[in-house]
Image (spheres, rainbow, N blue to C red):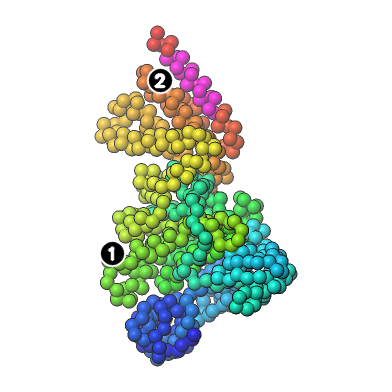
Amino acid sequence: MEMLGEIVRINGSLVLASFPEKPKIGDLVEVGELRLMGEIVRLTENIAAIQCYEATSGLRPGEPVRDTGKPLMAELGPGLMGTIFDGVQRSEIELWKLTGPFITRGVTIPPLDRRKKWDFIPRVKVGDEVVEGDIIGTVKETTAIEHRILVPVGLKGTISDISEGKFTVNEPVATLKTTEGERSLTMVQIWPVRVPRPFKERVPLTMPLITGQRVIDTFFPVAKGGAACIPGGFGTGKTVMLQQIAKWADADIILYIGCGERGNEMADVVTHFPEITDPKTGSRIIERTIIVANVSNMPVSAREASMYMGITMAEYFRDQGYDVAVMADSTSRWAEALRDLSGRLEEIPAERGYPAYLADRIAEIYERAGRVRTLGSEERIGSVTILGAVSPPGGDFSEPVTTHTLRFVGTFWALDSELAFRRHFPAINWLRSFTRYLSVASRWWSRFDPAWEQLRARALGLLEDASEIEETARIIGEKALPDEQRLVLLLSEMIREGFLVQNAFHDVDTYCDAEKQARLLRVIIDFYDAVEPLVSRGVPIEKIRELRVITEIMRLKERREIAEIDRVRREMLAQVGELAQEYEVESE
């Protein structure tokens, strides 16, 4: 129910308006003569505090405010895929066509194209009983994605009419006979973005999200339907890492949320990302990607809404039975928007000026990740995996956004400025990172190597031991160390340079499949097992370092053929055998 009020006070993006009757919190409003989009965030009697999604310059007290009576909604239907939206789901491509590069305030356009006709193919027939979440038909939205048209939440009944052919998103494609009468079904649904979409039940996480990045997949995997945090200071490679995951992750759909990022970084994403060839389909990766671009020079309230908007669209495709990966870059900018709005509302600040409810809001975001059994009479499993970048000031992981996020995620990829300065990318610190999805990953990885979990533990153990030995080496020098410890340093170097470092711009090394990862890890640990007895029997570490095969092992990651790993392993065993034989002759 619409209601008209008027502006009382303006404080930046916050507008106070009085209404003749008490409105509802969360209602979408149109502010001033320009009809700027806003949302009611607080009520005091009949005075509503409104956060505007557009710049408020030029507004004056006394101008009208229209309460639409509805919350901020997402439009869900064919036409989402491949589109670049702003934080309130306006197509930025269409806005450019309409207003040019500088968006005119007060411009509203429908999120989905009302003119384009889609080929609708029915999946049910007249007389079929359907319930909420059932698929009534499909649309081939792109070459990569079949869009499944669902019965809206809350509806069930009998199909009394359904048609095949070309339709726009708001034209009826079917008629549903319910207990309350007949209801026309179109290909578009709307859903309030701050309300999670329903499902039947959560199901156990059973497999990791394979990204092709060795340090992630092997050492710190994230499960499909899980949540991960990627904190790192400026220049540590968060954005490139998210783009690599978006390109190579084995998710069906990618949803990239640029929340408060610098304009040049977001411009790079929207310019070059659509040009990337999808390794899965051979077409453009944009055909299975949705981008929400809400840069730092846009109003903070729209930045705050963009996260909910993106996750709502992800849940919609999850309900169709797809695995969706959400890249949120970055949740720190989103939290800063919360802090700005909280300050304008004159709320009592907590740590570092953030509102006291920061932890609750972060939990709301990450709790919408999961693997679920969807609504509908047929069995469908879908998942939403949320990967959230955090930009702690000065790389300080003790700041509130990082510490609160750690409570709600299962994987923590700690980016390290020192590693980045040494050109070690991905700059994930193996001593500070962790995963809670190891049991899920172990069951899946055992198909490639039954001893995968033990090999991973040994590699991490060698890296941890090497870190402690390096502290001593800085004081007394490496040559003063026992050969056993120097061997650990050598293996640590081989793991770092031959396994952890990965070149995102190398034709082969940009992606490493699971079988290759398992076999690379195996050959490195096998090398250690082969030479460690020699060192313990007195073979000088310098002799070990002189083995030609070490360089070959460290370059295996750049070889395309997996058979090369077997060849190098045979050569490694031969060279180690020759060294052992030579040592035995000398010792006699």
**In the rendered image of this protein, does residue 16 appear above or below residue 406?**
below
| Residue drawn 42% across the image and 80% down it | 24
**In the rendered image of this protein, does residue 213 appear above or below residue 298?**
above
* Residue 404 occupies quadrant: bottom left
Asked which secondary structure carries label 1, the reply is: helix
Circle 2: is it few (<14), some (14-19), or many (20+) Cα within 10 Å? some
| Residue drawn 41% across the image and 86% down it | 59
Q: In which quadrant is the C terminus drawn? A: top left
Residue closer to the observer: 4 or 376: 376
Sequence-earlier tag: 2 or 1: 1
Q: Which amino acid is tagged 1? A: Arg
* Residue that badge 1 annotates: 352
Q: Which amino acid is tagged 2? A: Leu
Q: Residue furthest front?
A: 179
Examine the rendering and report whether any part of residue 365 can be seen. Answer: yes
| Residue drawn 37% across the image and 18% down it | 537
Mark 2–mark 1 distance (CA, rounded to whole Å): 56 Å
In the rendering, at what x and y percent does residue 51 appear?
Answer: 40, 77
Q: Which residues lie in the magenta part?
A: 568-583
* Residue 7 occupies quadrant: bottom left
